[in-house]
Image (cartoon, rainbow, N blue to C red):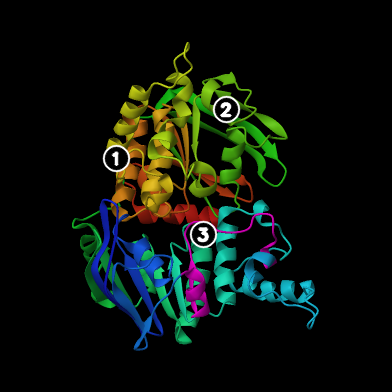
């Protein structure tokens, strides 16, 4: 049994944990949930020795643990898979999995690459990662990188496995495969601490759940005794609902973006579509189906082999992301905020306003207007309810959900006419998720933007979109219209999507 006994931890201006006591049993999948900023990440970092508690202690099988760093926790058999992707991009999948347990040829010190790759392949197969072990990490999607991290944890034979939003970049099929692995580990006596904002996953997988709110332990309950609504109330003190946000007033007479016969080898196969003013167009499909790949072509990050993009009826020449933003007012909220969406060492203010520096710079002095920078940042922080100690706080010190809000805020500040939002609520709690859903809907309905929503969360795509394109094998295989019709049920729409993917 692993116990946290009266743990407290403070940072400047914030009490992250306040006298928190938790118990994790062997052979148990124990969920740790709460809104962003509730203290989950701090608790995890204390368990793994990254942070030291101000008071309280950690006890494992009646023995007090005293970790000075993360390496100490690994030696003790405690391993974590972070939501944020942490891989060596220029190394292979096998090297990343086997990094701390390389196999050598006897005592020569020479790496036995054949055996390293074969061993890594065993763990890759366990997580459904069907790629050559020699594949270089930088070529992989966010989902494949996440599966590599999980495979590395399995290879470590951990006695305590902490999973921080492990399915954030996975499809439903990949998630179900992971759950099967976790249940097998549970049967072998491993303690599994599962952090997730996806309530359905917690209810389906976990044995019990502990809730943190504002740094305090609200309670621990067996999952069998809770309904989804009960758990949400424990987390945020109010109810949430999954009903569609309402009928969107789409202006079919004003086309904002049109793609015609877009082709790129192994990324897009003859894709054509249109999106209109006031519309939320959903892109749904499994990882690798071509959704994100198409988005990157649209913004100029990748070049099409053939085909054309039209903006407001005129053919566009988008050579790079700068063109897409400044010439055509297209914004892209990336699915990978850590590596592509944010400057982690920079402030909240800098991250929000970086897309509009050219608009608020003094043409004579070439200095950015501080008053405008502050005013715009304050507006965005207020509108998205970003929890930060100040505009000057480093983004890397924010919770995952608040980082995502900042990632969205910088494109809202740029006032883009077309906004592509890729997995907007990955790692975001249920309360913040509702805010972001409403924000996306308002961008279309009230601000008259054209929004392309890319999401692996079927409930999300159905709740927010008015039209959905279904992707498979780098092409569009189906279209669902009038998704926001009040007469249509979630089950009806989800089954229609499923038929296209079958």
Instruction: Choose between 107 and 121: the one closer to the eye.
Output: 107
Q: For marks 3 and 1, give the CA distance.
A: 28 Å
Across and down, in percent, residue 133 comes to: 71, 66
User: Image quadrant for the N terminus?
Assistant: bottom left
* 468 lies above or below 219: above
Question: In the orientation shown, which residue stands out farthest toward the left?
Answer: 237
Question: In the orientation shown, which residue stands out farthest toward the top?
Answer: 364
Of labels 2 and 3, the one closer to you: 2
Q: For marks 2 and 3, give the CA distance.
A: 30 Å
Q: Is 89 contained in the magenta span?
A: yes
Residues at discs 2 and 3 in contact (Cβ within 8 Å):
no
Residue at numbered disc 3: 170
Residue at numbered disc 2: 322
Of labels 3 and 1, the one closer to you: 3
- Residue 82 appearing in the image: yes
Instruction: Choose between 154 and 454: the one closer to the eye.
Output: 154
Q: Which of the two discs, 3 and 1, labels the residue nearer the N terminus?
A: 3
Name the secondary structure under disc 2: helix
Across and down, in percent, residue 484 comes to: 35, 42
Name the secondary structure under disc 3: loop
Of labels 1 and 2, the one closer to you: 2
- In the picture, measured across the screen, residue 193 lies left or right of residue 387, that is right
* 296 lies above or below 36: above
* 25 lies above or below 421: below
Name the secondary structure under disc 1: loop
Residue at numbered disc 1: 246
- In the picture, measured across the screen, residue 483 lies left or right of residue 305, that is left
Q: Is 484 contained in the magenta span?
A: no
* 187 lies above or below 43: below
Q: Which residues are magenta?
A: 69-94
């Amino acid at each position: 049994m692993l116990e946290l006994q009266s743990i407290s931890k403070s940072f400047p201006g914030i009490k992250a944990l306040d006298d928190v006591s938790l118990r994790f049993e062997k052979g148990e999948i124990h969920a740790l949930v709460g809104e962003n900023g509730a203290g989950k990440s701090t608790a995890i970092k204390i368990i793994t020795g990254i942070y030291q508690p101000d008071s309280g202690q950690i006890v494992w099988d009646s023995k007090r643990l005293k970790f000075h760093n993360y390496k100490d926790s690994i030696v003790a058999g405690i391993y974590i898979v972070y939501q944020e992707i942490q891989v060596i991009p220029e190394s292979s999948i096998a090297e990343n999995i086997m990094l701390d347990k390389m196999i050598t040829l006897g005592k020569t010190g020479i790496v036995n690459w054949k055996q390293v790759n074969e061993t890594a392949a065993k763990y890759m197969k366990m997580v459904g990662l069907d790629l050559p072990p020699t594949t270089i990490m930088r070529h992989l999607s966010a989902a494949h990188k996440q599966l590599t991290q999980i495979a590395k944890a399995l290879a470590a034979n951990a006695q305590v496995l902490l999973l921080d939003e492990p399915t954030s970049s996975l499809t439903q099929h990949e998630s179900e495969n992971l759950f099967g692995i976790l249940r097998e580990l549970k049967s072998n006596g491993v303690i599994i601490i599962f952090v997730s904002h996806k309530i359905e996953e917690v209810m389906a997988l976990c044995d019990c759940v502990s809730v943190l709110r504002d740094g305090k332990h609200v309670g621990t309950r067996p999952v069998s005794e809770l309904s989804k609504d009960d758990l949400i109330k424990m987390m945020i003190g109010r109810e949430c609902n999954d009903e569609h946000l309402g009928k969107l007033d789409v202006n079919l007479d004003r086309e904002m973006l049109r793609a015609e016969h877009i082709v790129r080898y192994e990324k897009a196969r003859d894709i054509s579509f249109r999106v209109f003013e006031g519309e939320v167009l959903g892109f749904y499909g499994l990882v690798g189906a071509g959704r994100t790949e198409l988005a990157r072509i649209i913004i100029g990050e990748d070049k099409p082999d053939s085909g054309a993009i039209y903006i407001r009826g005129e053919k566009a020449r988008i050579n790079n992301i700068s063109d897409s933003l400044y010439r055509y007012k297209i914004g892209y909220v990336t699915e990978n905020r850590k590596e592509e969406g944010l400057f982690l060492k920079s402030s909240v203010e800098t991250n929000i306003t970086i897309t509009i520096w050219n608009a608020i710079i003094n043409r004579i002095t070439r200095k950015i207007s501080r008053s405008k920078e502050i005013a715009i940042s304050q507006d965005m922080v207020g509108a998205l309810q970003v929890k930060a100690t100040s505009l000057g706080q480093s983004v890397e010190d924010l919770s995952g959900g608040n980082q995502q809000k900042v990632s969205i805020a910088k494109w809202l500040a740029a006032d883009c006419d077309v906004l592509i939002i890729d997995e907007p609520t990955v790692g975001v709690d249920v309360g913040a998720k509702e805010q972001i859903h409403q924000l996306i809907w308002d961008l279309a309905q009230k601000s008259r933007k054209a929004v392309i929503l890319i999401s692996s969360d079927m409930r999300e795509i159905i709740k927010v979109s008015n039209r959905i394109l279904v992707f498979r094998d780098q092409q569009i295989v189906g279209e669902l219209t009038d998704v926001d019709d009040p007469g249509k049920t979630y089950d009806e729409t989800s089954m229609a999507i499923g038929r296209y993917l079958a």
